[in-house]
Image (cartoon, coloured by chain):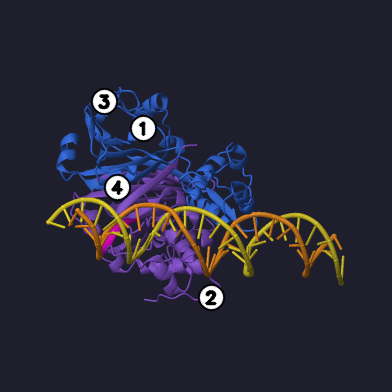
Chain colours: A blue, B purple, C orange, D yellow
DNA sequence: TATGTTTATATGTATGTACATATATTTGAT
DNA sequence: ATCAAATATATGTACATACATATAAACATA
């Protein structure tokens, strides 16, 4: 395993250290509970200051990935979120697992200038076009979710792909892009005119709104996804266990 | 507002600074979008080093309370309430951690015959009374969530407890009941007349509905909780990482 | 044997310093 | 008046250093 830091790189040292740590702590010996090398030695080995190393460590500690104990050491936390694999199912897999047959009503691909939120998430300017994917899906008797996805140009999608295949199969097999981290925000909203039209409900009717931010293994943004779910047709379930 | 740090205290300076910042950023001028004093000046004013001040700031930044922009300044982030499933915090702890002052509008305790869903979850008959706790809580300017909780008789609550204390403190310290597993179901709904009245919105307005099933260390049911959140006042955030 | 006491170890706290870099404003040249 | 360059401002990065403190293990004492 690479345990080195490139001092000539323009990537800040603490970010390199953070990345390195993220890889390091995936090592079974650490997930099994072994303590990481101590800060002073590790800093010396990486040829960075302890302060800089701690900057990286802090981030992982705040994220709950690492646990530090004064006088003892630092080890990998036992994750408290147990619904991981469940969360990683794609939409179609999720529905299949629930025994819901899915019908695709609309599928529209386009290249667009991103709005500020998207550009900001991707860390690009609003002048650079991104791939936009809109999908309306649901049960045979009617649609119940409208998705809008944007993809980072880095991913390499052309827009010519066969989007009837599961999305993450395309990304992983054809583009070697592996989703690793997902942040979601779930809230309730009143449907606007546009969404109401798509979901065949009245404007003002409640919908579940789900924003999803997907990152790759280097924590670089891949996908920005918005989902508008008809109320009562979708329930989000979470299971979490205390350590 | 007290803007001072006690150098003689045994409380670490960065913790004092953190606490001070949490109070500071509740000031309407900051929640309205004004930038905080710059780090160098603020550090000087508090008579601590910039490094120490940044230690405190970092924490709030990681929590999403503050947003820093290089060359510009630091300001309070968009103030929608959010909940992190991984943290396993109680409602009041959650809000406190985000520096949101919580007002309790109503608190009602009663013994009732459970409906079928509750009885079924508790694995008891509908003939055995259970403790019901109703709470209306929110910001000073108005309520944003209505909770209904039912507790399993096994827990031993009498109904005479001081429910102004955090609930899980009561359960853990006084009744030695430790919540270990939580299953949640989140969906969107239209507010009914009753809930609309409580939340001071119109019937039919969208709400976020959150069912929560809590189990103890032996996976025995403890609490059945229903939460009705005003739309746009509550965002549920989930972070999941693939192994 | 049991119980304090020291010591080794690792993280926690705190400061001072220096320079880099992103952003907005001001200044200056054309 | 316009555009480019300088500058002011604030956060970002990075280091060296020093001492405090919690924990466990080794040691010494009664």
Q: Position of residue B103 (x, y in %)?
A: 33, 66
Distance from the alpha carbon under mark 1 to that under mark 4: 28 Å
Protein chain holding label 3: A
Look at mark 1 in the image and give the residue it sits on.
A155
Q: Nearer the viewer, mark 2 or mark 1?
A: 1
Q: Contact (CB < 8 A) between labels 1 and 4?
A: no
Q: Contact (CB < 8 A) between labels 3 and 4?
A: no
Q: Position of residue B209 (x, y in %)?
A: 31, 48
Look at mark 2 in the image and give the residue it sits on.
B9
Q: Nearer the viewer, mark 1 or mark 3?
A: 1
Does the magenta segment cover residue B47? no
Distance from the alpha carbon under mark 2 to that under mark 1: 53 Å
Q: Residues within 10 Å of mark 3 (few under 14, many from 20)?
A: some
Q: Which mark is residue B72?
A: none
**Secondary structure beneath label 1:** helix
Question: Residue at horizontal 62%, vertical 50%?
Answer: A44
Distance from the alpha carbon under mark 3 to that under mark 4: 25 Å
Look at mark 3 in the image and give the residue it sits on.
A103
Residue B196, located in which quarter of the rendered image?
bottom left
Question: Residue at horizontal 50%, vertical 50%?
Answer: A14
Distance from the alpha carbon under mark 1 to that under mark 3: 27 Å
Q: Nearer the viewer, mark 1 or mark 4?
A: 1
Which stretch did the figure color magenta? B142-147
């Amino acid at each position: 395993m690479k345990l080195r830091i490139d001092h000539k790189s323009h990537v800040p040292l603490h970010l390199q250290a953070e990345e390195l740590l993220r890889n390091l702590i995936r090592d079974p010996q650490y997930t099994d509970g072994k303590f990481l090398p101590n800060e002073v030695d590790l800093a010396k080995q990486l040829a960075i200051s302890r302060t800089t190393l701690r900057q990286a460590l802090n981030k992982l500690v705040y994220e709950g990935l690492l646990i530090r104990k004064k006088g003892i050491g630092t080890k990998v936390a036992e994750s408290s979120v147990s619904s991981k694999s469940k969360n990683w199912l794609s939409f179609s897999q999720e529905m299949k697992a629930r025994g819901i047959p899915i019908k695709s009503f609309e599928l529209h691909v386009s290249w667009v200038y991103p709005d500020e939120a998207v550009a900001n998430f991707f860390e690009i300017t609003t002048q650079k076009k991104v791939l936009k994917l809109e999908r309306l899906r649901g049960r045979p008797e009617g649609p119940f979710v409208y998705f809008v996805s944007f993809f980072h140009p880095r991913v390499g999608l052309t827009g010519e792909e066969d989007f009837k295949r599961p999305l993450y199969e395309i990304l992983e097999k054809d583009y070697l892009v592996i989703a690793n981290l997902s942040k979601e925000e779930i809230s309730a909203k009143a449907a606007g005119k546009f969404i109401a039209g798509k979901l065949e409900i009245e404007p003002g009717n409640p919908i579940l709104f789900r924003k999803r931010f997907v990152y790759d293994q280097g924590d670089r943004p891949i996908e920005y996804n918005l989902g508008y779910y008809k109320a009562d047709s979708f329930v989000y379930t979470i299971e979490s266990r205390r350590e």
